[in-house]
Image (cartoon, rainbow, N blue to C red):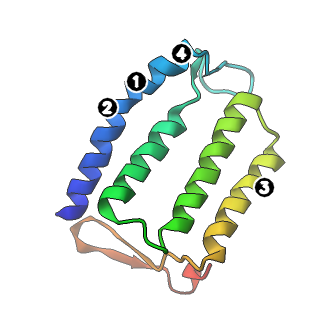
Amino acid sequence: MVTLLLVAVTMIVSLTITPIVIAISKRLNLVDKPNFRKVHTKPISVMGGTVILFSFLIGIWIGHPIETEIKPLIIGAIIMYVLGLVDDIYDLKPYIKLAGQIAAALVVAFYGVTIDFISLPMGTTIHFGFLSIP
């Protein structure tokens, strides 16, 4: 029940701030313009990651006090956010994006964070076994 409440709160935060962030993004001309590599045909906000990161941080703040084992996840998420924002603004080369993604994963793995299992609705659990090794 607590998990569903936490998901609901983060979803409400996300839905509430998305229009605000889009308006700010348009006002500041922080938009991704279409080109041959893009799927979209109209300029779209490059600040979508801001909504995701903010909602994620609110969810963690409400659900878990900032504990030692949460810090590497926050650092990894911030690295991914900055990487995505810089990529949207400067159109980074794929190898640079890959290097940033690997760096974010290494930060999390360096601190020994593992995902041993995931819990699905209806009480189902998937255990990763040896795949959970960082």
Marks 4 and 3 in Cβ contact (< 8 Å): no
Task: Give, as a three-letter code, the residue at label 2.
Answer: Thr
Distance between mark 3 and mark 1 Cα atoms: 32 Å
- Category of crowding for the residue at label 2, using alpha-carbon neighbours closer than 10 angstroms: few (below 14), some (14–19), many (at least 20): few
Of the numbered discs 2 and 4, the one sitting upstream in the chain is 2
Residue 12 lies left or right of residue 88; in this view the side is left
**Residue 132: percent from left, percent from top:** 55, 80
Residue designated by label 1: 20
Q: In which quarter of the image is the N terminus?
A: bottom left
- Category of crowding for the residue at label 3, using alpha-carbon neighbours closer than 10 angstroms: few (below 14), some (14–19), many (at least 20): few
Q: What element carries label 2?
A: helix
Q: Is residue 102 above or below residue 119?
A: above
**Residue 29: percent from left, percent from top:** 61, 15
Q: What element carries label 1?
A: helix
What numbered label is drawn on residue 16? 2
Task: Give, as a three-letter code, the residue at label 3.
Answer: Ala
Residue ID at (35%, 54%)? 59
- Which of the 4 quarters of the picture holds residue 12? top left
**Residue 86: percent from left, percent from top:** 70, 37
- Which of the 4 quarters of the picture holds residue 36? top right
Marks 2 and 1 in Cβ contact (< 8 Å): yes
Residue designated by label 4: 26
Distance between mark 2 and mark 4 Cα atoms: 17 Å
**Residue 5: percent from left, percent from top:** 20, 55
Q: Is residue 57 above or below residue 85?
A: below
Distance between mark 2 and mark 3 Cα atoms: 33 Å
Residue designated by label 3: 99
